[in-house]
Amino acid sequence: MIGIAVLSVFCGPGGRGGNTLAVVRDGTTVPGGRARRELAAALGHSETVFVDDARRGVVDIWTPSARLPFAGHPLVGTGRLLDARVLRPPAGDVPVRRDGEFTWVRADPAWAAGRHTRRYGSPAAVDALPAPPEGEGWLYAWAWEDEAAGKVRARGFPRRGDGIAEDEATGAAALVLTHELGRALDIRQGRGSLIRTRPLPGGSVEIGGRVRVLRDRAPVAKDEPTAP
């Protein structure tokens, strides 16, 4: 039996924006990397989380093409869904806290290695980029909206050839940018998503945002078609 919740993570005010996320509540119903990759591809979200042990917070994160040791929006969303205090993806322990409507996770920026940031001259220049821009590798395109206030306009492009042309909101790339700039940020990404970040003593970074549950399906038979 497979039970799948679909969330929108890093929603802006009024529920605008947000990156969709699938959470398989009992990951043991989908054993093995091949089966998980195939289900993630079939669901079509930028990431799918398999909860392997809800009590201990053990989770496994997949894109439609690859397993990730760490990713931001899957952990923020799953942390809110499970009301967890800690999640345990392959990268390591990720503390979770809730502050009103925001859910925050704390992580090591090194876990998000491979995501490259590129500053543009204005928010309009970021908005004008095609999806995705030419080139290879994970690109986080950004510009200051208000540097003094730490407000950023950003767009995220995985460029990994798996059908995800643009990530509506991505915590891992926001974590990298926060580490590079060394300051708290208020990031407007995609069509209307909002990501907040802050560097912490010791080099870790917190990333936070709103989470909305779009639907939470009861378990269904494994051979029953599952809607995206």
Image: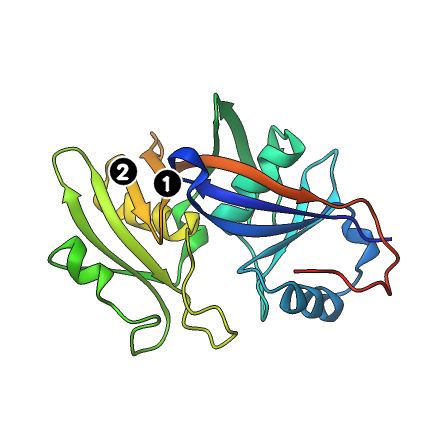
- Disc 1 crowd rating (10 Å Cα; few below 14, some 14-19, many 20+) is many
Q: Quadrant of residue 152?
A: top left
Q: Amino acid at mark 1?
A: Ile
Q: Position of residue 70 (x, y in %)?
A: 52, 52
Q: Is residue 86 above or below residue 23?
A: above
| 2 horizontally vs 174: left or right | right
| 217 horizontally vs 101: left or right | right
Location of mark 1 (residue): 195
Q: Quadrant of residue 138?
A: bottom left
Residue pictured at 74% horizontal, 38% vertical = 54
Q: Amino acid at mark 2?
A: Leu
Location of mark 2 (residue): 185
Mark found first going from the N terminus, 2 or 1 = 2
Mark 1: secondary structure = strand
| 153 horizontally vs 24: left or right | left
Q: How many marks?
A: 2
Residue pictured at 29% horizontal, 71% vertical = 130
Task: Compare residues 117 and 82 and report the one nearer the observer.
Answer: 82
Q: Is residue 216 above or below residue 64?
A: above
Cβ–Cβ below 8 Å for labels 2 and 1?
A: yes
Q: Name the quarter where the C terminus is drawn.
A: bottom right
Residue pictured at 35% horizontal, 54% vertical = 190
Closer mark to the observer between disc 2 and disc 1: 1
Q: Position of residue 88 (x, y in %)?
A: 62, 42
Q: Position of residue 18 (x, y in %)?
A: 45, 46
Residue pictured at 30% horizontal, 45% vertical = 188
Q: Is residue 132 above or below residue 115?
A: below
Residue 93 visible in the current orientation? no
- Disc 2 crowd rating (10 Å Cα; few below 14, some 14-19, many 20+) is many
Q: Disc 2 to disc 1, how far (Cα)?
A: 8 Å
